[in-house]
Amino acid sequence: EGYEAIAFVPTHMIRGQEYERVTAVADGLPVSAPLLDTDVDLKWMAGLLDGIAAEEGRTLLVMGHGTDHVADATYARLREALSDRVKLACVEGRHALGGILDELESVPGKRLTLMPLMLVAGDHAKNDLAGDAPDSWKNILLERGFDVRTRLTGLGALEAVQRRFVEKAKAICELQNQER
């Protein structure tokens, strides 16, 4: 086709199993970093989420995907970067909702907005987070007396996140140009 430089730009959140599959398929070609890769990325995301919590006027509880991969530690690192107005739990991995329920009891007015920490508000957001089943996060929290709102917006719909992926793509392309 005449291209001189090719780079993979996956839209993964962390360096988990799916990201590793992309790097394996890339077969040595450059691959941009996932959204939550460095401490700078985590601070950036913490600031973005804090802004959403301020906009909502209540504590924001975000649902990450989680994983049994070692990259699950990224969620623990993100938790450390979050302000008091933002809480994080995951569908899978070590950071389940049950592990923070007691902590959530101290949320002012027990007022929460639930939002996916995922690029799209798909099945996990619509069912596990905000669904009508008794085991959805929304219903678990309502049962415990919380005032719950849902914000079913995937991160990929936010311009700031889109720009961040473009920055990561530019960074990998610049690195590739320097190496040539």
Image: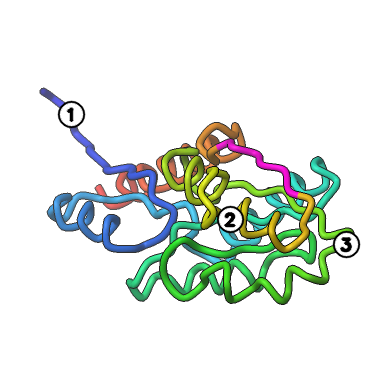
At horizontal 36% and vertical 62% (from top left) the residue drawn is: 15
Mark 3 crowd level (few <14, some 14–19, many ≥20, 10 Å Cα): few
Q: Name the residue under label 3.
A: 108
At horizontal 78% and vertical 70% (from top left) the residue drawn is: 105
Lower position in the chain sequence, tag 1 or tag 2: 1
What amino acid is at disc 1?
Tyr
What amino acid is at disc 3?
Pro
Where in the figure is residue 128, as x and y percent of width and height? Answer: 49, 51
Q: Name the residue under label 1.
A: 3
Give 59 or 46, whichever is nearer the viewer.
59
Where in the figure is residue 5, as x and y percent of width and height? Answer: 23, 37
Query: In the image, which residues are magenta?
Result: 148-153
Real-space Cα separation, disc 3 to disc 2, in angstroms: 18 Å
Q: Residue 113's mark?
A: none
Give 67 or 150, whichever is nearer the viewer.
150
Q: Is residue 149 magenta?
A: yes
Q: Name the residue under label 2.
A: 137
- Callout 2 secondary element: helix
Report the side of 19 relative to 135 (left or right). Answer: left
Report the side of 95 relative to 68 (left or right). Answer: right
Q: Are marks 1 and 3 in contact (CB under 8 Å)?
A: no
